[in-house]
Image (cartoon, rainbow, N blue to C red):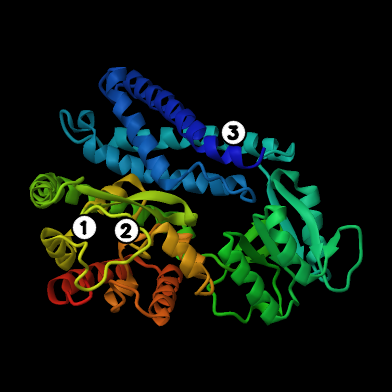
Amino acid sequence: MKRRFDTYFPWLFLVADFVASGLALWVCSVALNTFGLFENVNSSALLPLSFLWALISGLRKDYKIGRTEEYEATLKHLLITVFWFIGAMAVLWIPLHKPQFQLIPIMLFGLGMTLFMGMFRVGVHMVLKDYRSHGHNYRNAVIIGKGGTSPKLADVFRIRKDFGINFLGYFDNQAQCHQTRGDVESFFDQAEALDLDLIYIHEHMDSRTVKKIIDFADEHYIKVKMIPGGSLQLEKNLSFSRYGDFFVINVNEIPLDNALNALLKRVFDILFSGFMIVAVLSWMIPLVGILIKWESRGPIFFIQKRNGINNSVFNCLKFRSMTPNDYSDEKQATKNDPRVTRIGAFLRRTSLDEMPQFINVLLGDMSIVGPRPHTVPMNQDFKTQVARYDSRHKIRPGITGLAQVRGYRGEIENPYQIRNRVRLDSFYINNWSFLLDMGIMAKTFNEVVSNKDDAY
């Protein structure tokens, strides 16, 4: 059982975490009431707190228990969740404000949640390790290059079954043993059939081969980890993963692989898109809908299949700006395009046709800032034209992006335009920061107001 486990485990974890948090909160409440530190609270008043815990835990993705992490890491993640939970609880939960703000109960609730949920989380971690040690929830891995410390890493996989890493063998140009699957070049022929999740690169592999392997892995969403050595002279931000007492270097980690960064970006997306839906779309959809219907028959929204994170396909929402036609997926809008309606031209010129995508953001299909998504046929076409094109799908696509505020907005007329878009998207993915997102949003507003030449 490899992939299917990952599909249902997060939901199973969140449900169990919800129940465990409810029990922990009830025990804390009873204990505090017994010692006269907190007034008796009905169980129904504790229920919203369990939902709040589940929300924070889900947003922080606490269910992602790293297969090589020890129990200390699980407790560290828990402490951060407790911190966020107690802060939100202190602000939002009314019983803590009657008859006055109660600091001691807040602190004791935090201590109790750390104790009880710590036992629960470590218990889940132990069960998960045992489950993986019996050959379930595994990841397929190969080592490219044999020698040096490579055999030691293979021994770690063999001994630490609880890591759940299924070692499939080596690819090496010289070594000939029962675990060698072929030379390095044959790796590229066999990789897709092996259904790989992880690639470990030998410490002395030449830099050209290393770059080729990383480019291949980026295109196929495979994580690359490098055993330390001289071939690390790459323009990459490196981090480490620990396998017991053995360390490897993560070559293609990105800032949004960090749980706190991902949480910060997602929380902002939810808050900002929620505000825009309530404050703007609530009246804009009826108004624009009437104008669209008044000018031409057809739906208010134009729903188009586009590629999102990990190349998954989602329904991208826009206000319909064209008369209904059969070429919308394959043919880009051009200047003076006869398909564009009068209200559609206005919507495109002001970028208001993109406004419904805030619904996509709230649903989790998109982000406020990220690489712009293309249609499925366009995606297939660009993949053949631009090297490492698919690496832009490592993160959620955005309503706006770095490429758009750098002048690459609208129709793609020449190959250099898509190449430069991909280059800027790659820079954004590898150098993401919250301040960078804020800067792009500010520049987007300025572009929409002052530069409408490329929007048609």
The residue to which callout 1 is attached is 322
Q: Residue at x 14, y 47 (%)?
A: 285
The front one of 351 and 143 is 351
Would you place residue 66 above or below residue 25 in this image?
below
Foreground: disc 1 or disc 3: 1
Question: Residue 428's x, y, as percent?
Answer: 40, 71
Question: Residue 216's x, y, as percent?
Answer: 62, 68
Spatial CA distance of label 1 from label 3 is: 56 Å
Q: Are there few (<14), some (14-19), or many (20+) residues within 10 Å of tag 1?
A: many
Q: Quadrant of residue 207?
A: bottom right
The residue to which callout 3 is attached is 123
Kind of residue at badge 3:
Gly
Query: In the structure shown, which secondary structural element does the residue marked by tag 3 occupy?
Result: helix
Q: Are there few (<14), some (14-19), or many (20+) residues within 10 Å of tag 2?
A: some
Quadrant, the C terminus: bottom left
Kind of residue at badge 1:
Met
Q: Residue at x 35, y 18 (%)?
A: 34
Which mark, residue 328? 2
Spatial CA distance of label 2 from label 3 is: 52 Å
Earlier residue among tags 1 and 2: 1
Earlier residue among tags 2 and 3: 3
Q: Quadrant of residue 206?
A: bottom right
Q: How many marks?
A: 3
